Image (cartoon, rainbow, N blue to C red):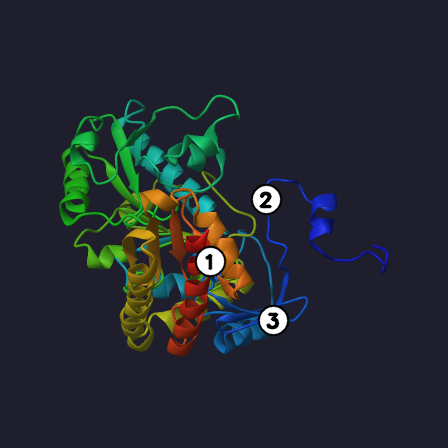
């Protein structure tokens, strides 16, 4: 590239496939919960790379793990194992219901592995008729063709030709809807223990326990997609731990690597045995560099200090949003749990979540949306209280601008 070529947002349009519409802001440096762009403008980060940067930017434990392992060995292949992968898998098994771990590179890949395992488990144990997969409308499970079909948002899966078959969708928090679909032909029910992309929707106690019971009655596996909710996001290491329900398979990614790409599917020995040698694989999955960073992230988050702090920090966000709403009356409901919070807009402001996001960026705070009607916050789990107060003051300025128009 000629040295004279400016590296800016216009270059994106020249050289990148146009499936994204990124901000004009190009961050170049981060530390903790703050980011600086090419012009050295400072932003408070409440987006967290979409619930990925669980320890903020350049956390010393992650930088150290990356540096140490980067000077040892980066990649092998799945014809060999490695020490970081084995250590991380053991820690994940010790901390959860799981007995076996499969490493991938992303949440979509972890979910792809879970769906293939569920189908193979059903085929081996019950025959080829037991192939139905039930998921939930507005769910999100990745962008591979299989996972995007299982996800309950047709806009993401339409337009690519014939979809994988035997996939059905019930309504979240509606047990009757699931009862109408589930049968002995169902091999798995796939659900988020809190819908993220679908609007930050928490499950009722009756619903989540009813889903587990229906799976048991119909000899179906319960798959929890904890790609967004896992690794401390909701205040427990994994969301299932607070729900009184244990899944058969769980997928985890996003925060697992604290910003380094890694995903994992975890399950029991009895279920895992159906992914026999050669039935599935990943070239990069479980590579030593990713697993070393993920081990540091997992160790840091899985402490009483971090997990206990999430609930008090969450309250600061919710209290601030309620105070903003007292003044401007823009939110219909504050949803979510822990550090995954959604502010659903009132009828008057429906469809304007992106406008609020852009206005917030102008005020120096990075946020997210969950659909057109929900402002979403997924910050670092260790964001300083002072950053929360300062960031929410900036967010209030953005809301005030939108409310004035």
Asked if residue 82 shows in the view, the reply is no
Q: Which mark, by number, is residue 72? A: 3
Q: Position of residue 252 (x, y in %)?
A: 39, 53
- Label 3, label 2: how far apart the Cα atoms are: 35 Å
Label 3 neighbour load within 10 Å: few <14, some 14-19, many 20+: few
Q: Quadrant of residue 313?
A: bottom left
Looking at the image, residue 240 lies above or below residue 339: above
Q: Position of residue 281 (x, y in %)?
A: 49, 44
Of residues 144 and 347, the one nearer the viewer is 347
According to the picture, the residue beneath numbered tag 2 turns out to be 20
Q: Which mark, by number, is residue 401? A: 1
Q: Earlier in the sequence, mark 3 or mark 2?
A: 2
Q: Which mark, by number, is residue 365? A: none
Q: Position of residue 400 (x, y in %)?
A: 42, 60
Of residues 387 and 32, the one nearer the viewer is 387
Q: Quadrant of residue 75?
A: bottom right
Q: Position of residue 200 (x, y in %)?
A: 32, 50
């Amino acid at each position: 590239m000629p040295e004279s070529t400016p590296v800016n947002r216009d270059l994106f349009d020249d050289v990148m496939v146009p499936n994204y519409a990124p901000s004009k802001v190009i961050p170049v440096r981060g530390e903790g919960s703050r980011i600086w762009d090419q012009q050295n403008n400072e932003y408070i980060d409440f987006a967290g790379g979409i619930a990925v940067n669980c320890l903020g930017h350049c956390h010393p434990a992650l930088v150290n793990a990356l540096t140490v392992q980067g000077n040892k060995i980066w990649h092998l292949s799945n014809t060999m194992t490695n020490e970081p992968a084995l250590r991380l898998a053991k820690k994940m098994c010790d901390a959860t219901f799981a007995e076996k771990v499969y490493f991938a590179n992303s949440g979509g890949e972890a979910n792809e592995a879970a769906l293939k395992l569920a189908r193979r488990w059903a085929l081996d144990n019950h025959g080829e008729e037991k192939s139905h997969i039930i998921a939930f409308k507005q769910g999100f499970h990745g962008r591979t063709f299989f996972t995007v079909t299982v996800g309950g948002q047709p806009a993401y899966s339409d337009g690519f030709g014939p979809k994988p078959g035997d996939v059905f969708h019930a309504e979240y928090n509606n047990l009757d809807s699931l009862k109408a679909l589930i049968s002995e032909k169902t091999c798995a029910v796939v659900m988020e223990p809190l819908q993220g992309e679908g609007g930050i929707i928490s499950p009722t106690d009756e619903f989540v326990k009813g889903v587990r019971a229906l799976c048991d009655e119909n000899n179906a596996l319960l798959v929890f997609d904890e790609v967004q909710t896992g690794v401390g996001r909701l205040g427990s290491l994994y969301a299932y731990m607070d729900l009184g329900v244990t899944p058969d398979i769980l997928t985890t990614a996003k925060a697992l690597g604290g910003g380094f790409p890694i995903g994992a599917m975890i399950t029991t020995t009895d279920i895992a045995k159906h992914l026999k040698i050669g039935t599935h694989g990943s070239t990069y999955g479980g590579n030593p560099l990713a697993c070393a960073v993920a081990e540091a992230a997992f160790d840091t988050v899985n402490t009483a200090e971090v997990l206990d702090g999430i609930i008090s920090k969450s309250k600061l966000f919710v209290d601030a949003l309620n105070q903003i709403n007292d003044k401007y009356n823009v939110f219909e409901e504050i949803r979510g749990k822990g550090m995954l919070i959604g502010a659903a807009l009132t009828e008057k402001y429906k469809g304007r979540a992106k406008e609020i996001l852009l206005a917030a960026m102008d005020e120096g705070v990075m946020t997210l949306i969950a659909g057109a009607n929900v402002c979403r916050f997924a910050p670092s789990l260790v964001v300083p209280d002072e950053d929360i107060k300062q960031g929410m003051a900036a967010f209030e300025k953005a809301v005030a601008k939108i409310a004035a128009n």
